[in-house]
Image: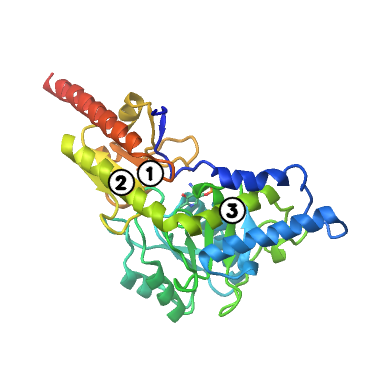
Amino acid sequence: MLKLPIYMDYQATTPVDKRALDAMLPYFTDKFGNAASKSHEFGWYAEKAVEMYRGKIAELIGCKTQEIVITSGATESNNLAVKGIAELFSNVKKKIITAPTEHKSVLDSCSALAKKGFEIYLLKVDKFGLIDLNELRDAIDGNTALVSIMTVNNEIGTIQPVEDIGRICKEKEVLFHTDATQAVGKLPVNVQQMNIDLMSFTAHKMYGPKGVGALYVKSKDPKVKLNPQIDGGGHENGFRSGTLNIPGIVGFGKACEIAANEMSVENEKIKKLGERFYQGLSSQLDDFFINGHPEKRFPGNLNICFKHADSGTLMMSMKEIAVSSGSACSSAAVEPSHVLKAIGLKDDELRSSIRFGIGRFSTEEEIDFAVNKVTESVKKIRSVFKQVLQH
Ligand code: PMP
């Protein structure tokens, strides 16, 4: 039986996998200890759990356990990486290279640094949201402290050539940070192979709990240092103070273990459902296109522009489907997406784009329902639009 409303907003967040929840539950009650309590069993249990589940997080991205710094999520990880590196280098290097399609937590961190005298160089992106590697190579100079380019875009799903970006940064001896929030747990990510020095990600986009994330910080060749953004008891090797969220870390680690085991099968399923959705729409509708790269993309993210169909009106007329226009990450303000603007969408296209997310719990039945509902709603809105034009 189809349960309404249908969730198609997997880029905003994901439900916690029951297996991750089961792993977490004892750590709220029986095993409630503080991992920093070194003098008794409660603390030892907590510390043991942290190290075991931190290990699973590390394993998923191919790094050492001690290279994982636990944070409250990717927003904090991005702030820590960008500001932490900039502040450390502030007396010698004052340039940061990024792109206009980054998440606001990177862009706003950069804006804060610009006010303190840093130069923020925004690379151009093409109509698919891809940066130009030659421009990157030319932009890196002796004043550059950091390059920060995301792995998968949260709004349009475009995958950047991270391995190549990392190689260029390595050649030029500049640190490379990537916000891989929409990639980790969904696509294979290996920090060694991809030449990454710092990487942000978060549990709640990969079927783990909200409020816990990580920053990978390379410990050798080079050993990356950064200025902490939260001072206190010196937890997390001094990178991030604060009592650890043990249930959150356990859920995050379990979610990583599940992702590692099931990613390839899950991706096949998501790809097929994405194709089914697109083909279904194509067989009944015209005048629409996918925003982002046609191939270099995460297949569970379909950001579609339906011409002559206002996205606000469209979403209102299909309340049975939970989708998003713009990005849920930008709090309450419904502003046209900075990502869609950056890839050159015209005003009317900006206002007619909707992101459909497909994930672990999506089904064929849901996709078929969504195809019919979207088709019916778009046709209705377009016919009203036509009538208005005729008057
Ligand atoms: N970066 C990207 C690419 C994201 O999609 C998000 C979540 N919308 C974030 C960062 C912020 O993550 P968190 O919600 O864990 O702070």
The residue at label 2 has a CB less than 8 Å from ligand 1: no
Please give the residue where the numbered disc 3 appears in the rendered image: 254
Q: Work out how far the residue at label 2 is from the one at label 3, CA to CA, in angstroms.
A: 26 Å
Q: Is residue 134 left or right of residue 187?
A: left
Above or below for 260 versus 386: below
Quadrant in which the C terminus appears: top left
Q: Where is residue 373 in the image (x, y as percent from the top left)?
A: 28, 28
Q: Of marks 2 and 3, which one's residue comes earlier in the chain?
A: 3
| Pointer 2 local density, CA inside 10 Å: few below 14, some 14–19, many at least 20 | many
Taking the image as drawn, is residue 3 in sight?
Answer: yes
Q: Work out how far the residue at label 2 is from the one at label 1, CA to CA, in angstroms.
A: 7 Å
Q: Which mark is residue 189?
A: none
Q: Does the residue at mark 2 contact the one at mark 1 (Cβ under 8 Å)? A: yes
The amino acid type of the residue labelled 3 equals: Lys
Q: In this view, does 130 lie to the left or right of 59?
A: left
Question: SS class of the residue under badge 2?
Answer: helix
The amino acid type of the residue labelled 2 equals: Gly
Above or below for 211 versus 176: above
Q: Residue at x 67, y 48 (%)?
A: 247
Above or below for 389 versus 131: above
- In front: 7, or 45? 45
The amino acid type of the residue labelled 1 equals: Ile
Image quadrant where residue 139 sits: bottom left
Q: Does the residue at mark 3 contact the one at mark 1 (Cβ under 8 Å)? A: no
Q: Residue at x 17, y 21 (%)?
A: 388
Q: Residue furthest top?
A: 391
